[in-house]
Image (cartoon, helix red, strand yellow):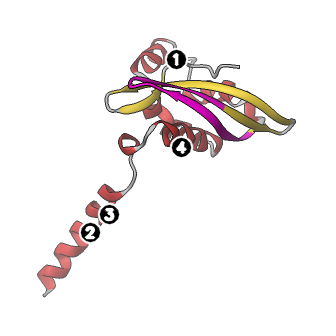
Amino acid sequence: MKKILWAALLILPWWMAGCGDSHSNLGPDPSLETAYSLALEGKFDETADFFSDDVLNYMKLHPEMTLQTLWNDRLNNGTVKGIKLIEHTLTEKDCDYKFMLFTSEGMADGEDSMVFEKGMWKFNTMKRIR
């Protein structure tokens, strides 16, 4: 009985972790919403997987460009408090978005795009379209 309990205690956390939503399990809309939510919470480092290899390689070559710097621009230096998706145009390889930005000054229109790369939806630009 002790062996069964120990086995359950060792296996259960790994099994539970595998059941959660990972970025690879998310479609385009949840990927965009999750990335923006993490950034709004200040969890910039956790958004790295949401950027294409081209963006990440550029950031490696330009150390002054950090994820926080990138998100500061996308979130208008902290004035954006939330987003609401309005519509998207989806193809097999990319998705263009239109959404509302809720800012400390009111609301504004926003646009962004993602590409499907290595089985995940990722931003392919460093700046949000204005």
Report how far apart the C-alphas of labels 4 and 3 lie in the structure: 20 Å
Residue matched to label 3: 16
Disc 2 packing (10 Å; few <14; some 14–19; many ≥20):
few
Looking at the rendering, the stretch of residues picked out in magenta corresponds to 81-98
Q: Secondary structure at mark 2?
A: helix
- Magenta span includes 114: no
86 and 117: which is toward the camera: 86
Where residue 74 appears, as percent x and y from the top left, is 66, 27
Q: Residue at x 62, y 42 (%)?
A: 42
Percent coordinates x, y for residue 20 in the rendering: 37, 56
Q: Residues within 10 Å of mark 1 (few under 14, many from 20)?
A: few
Q: Is residue 89 magenta?
A: yes
Disc sitting over residue 12 in the figure: 2
State the mark number for residue 63: 1
Q: Position of 74 compared to 27: left or right?
A: right
Task: Mark 1 and mark 4 in contact? Answer it, CB < 8 Å.
Answer: no
Q: Earlier in the sequence, mark 4 or mark 3?
A: 3
Report which residue position mark 4 lands on. 34
Q: Quadrant of the C terminus?
A: top right
